[in-house]
Amino acid sequence: MAKPVSIQVWNPNGKYRVISTKPMPGTRWINLLIEQDCRVEICTEKKTILSVDDIIALIGNKCDGVIGQLTEDWGDTLFAALSRAGGKAFSNMAVGYNNVDVNAANKHGVAVGNTPGVLTETTAELAASLSLAASRRIVEADEFMRAGLYDGWLPHLFVGNLLKGQTVGVIGAGRIGSAYARMMVEGFKMNLIYYDLYQSTRLEKFVTAYGEFLKSNGEQPVYWKRASTMEEVLREADVISLHPVLDKTTYHLINKDSLATMKKEAILVNCSRGPVVDEVALVEHLKQNPMFRVGLDVFEDEPFMKPGLAEMKNAVVVPHIASASKWTREGMATLAALNVLGKIKGYPIWSDPNRVEPFLNENSPPPAACPSIVNAKALGLPVSKL
Ligand SMILES: NC(=O)C1=CN([C@@H]2O[C@H](COP(=O)(O)OP(=O)(O)OC[C@H]3O[C@@H](n4cnc5c(N)ncnc54)[C@H](O)[C@@H]3O)[C@@H](O)[C@H]2O)C=CC1
Ligand SMILES: O=C(O)C(=O)CO
């Protein structure tokens, strides 16, 4: 058993004990909990990733709800501990919840929250940044400059790819994938090919309308295509960005064979989850194809990179920062806190997790609902009429 971890306490006399396994940005989330009679305990332990034992020590004998992080392993052991302590609510401070065993939560009657919507644009913007950084070799050029190697303009110096008129491929055209597609189509006049299990009519309508607008201005229009297989996207796209959930259908979706299907000079961006890409196969592909470039925010064995990746000049790597804008991170903290608070207070579940703005308006109290509970149906929780 790990020794008890250090904590900061807010509102010590609050009736409901809510734990946050990490300090989170902003103070609104703390105030919202305190106003509703919660004692808030924030783990201030220096170590970045808490173990299951650390979290069990935090939960203790009485705990009404926990706000946790995507780095934590929320399985049967933790849900059993939370349930024994009287807890009925857990929320990830993340939209992705592949670190959570939802069946185990169901078994112990614990509601599982996530934070959709508030990070859509921020994450899409990072995917767009990685697309540009990779296509225009920005990191390589920056390193070259700082190393004092620049001794004058040259016709061949850091020549990269023009995006305009090329095709952007999106795999997983949900909230973030669609936002990214729109940025790339509108911002760089790229054509779109996408693959998803579901049709994205709104995205298609957007590209059609933008194409018509360009045409009416005498410019080359843009086009969209919904691919019937992922391979079609891999074959046709010049820039491919991955935005599906991580589950058993998307594990190693990009592997040796799929990499071989892509164009030799293609750009691959991953802002979804590391295991969507077979990183060992990717390193080999980067070695064999120096004109193939990659922009990665996530890694298969975070916080580590597979051997060889750090040495690859044709890879841009950043440490899982896609949702890291101040507004988004504060909003994620608010949504996670309101998921836990709402369940503690017996509020119903917000009917549309794609429309969370009312919870984020700092000038008015949030609706009396849980913004997003992924196992609401399994637990038979009522839906808000608001
Ligand atoms: N790097 C980062 O910091 C961040 C990463 N994420 C990741 O992005 C993921 C997506 O987030 P949202 O767009 O909000 O979720 P979403 O649920 O709106 O979109 C996911 C899409 O993936 C599609 N999909 C599922 N299985 C698929 C398959 N086998 N092939 C193709 N498409 C498939 C779904 O139909 C859906 O349209 C999250 O689950 C999370 O893992 C999200 C935010 C920040
Ligand atoms: O929300 C998520 O799923 C993340 O990866 C962090 O923003």
Image (tube, rainbow, N blue to C red):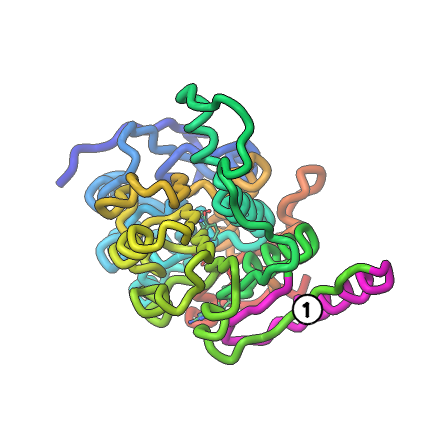
At x 45%, y 73%, the residue is 230
Left or right of residue 210, residue 312 in this image: left
Q: Position of residue 232 (x, y in %)?
A: 48, 74
- Of 194 and 36, which appears nearest the observer? 194
Q: For residue 284, what is the image quadrant?
A: bottom left
Give the percent coordinates (x, y) of residue 340: 46, 50
Residue 28: x and y in percent read: 57, 35
Please indicate whether residue 216 sits to the left or right of residue 249 in the image.
right
**Taking the image as drawn, is residue 74 in sight?**
no
Front-most of residues 209 and 382: 209
What residue lies at 39% left-to-right and 52% top-to-bottom?
A: 90
- Give the residue displayed 54% in from the left and 76% down from the top: 227
The span shown in magenta is 191-218
Question: In which image quadrant can residue 328 be found?
Answer: top right
Q: Say which element carries label 1.
A: loop
Category of crowding for the residue at label 1, using alpha-carbon neighbours closer than 10 angstroms: few (below 14), some (14–19), many (at least 20):
many
Q: Is residue 258 above or below residue 32?
A: below
In the picture of the structure, the residue carrying the numbered disc 1 is: 223
Question: In which quadrant of the rendered view does residue 222 lie?
Answer: bottom right
Q: Is residue 148 above or below residue 250?
A: above
Count the labels in the image: 1
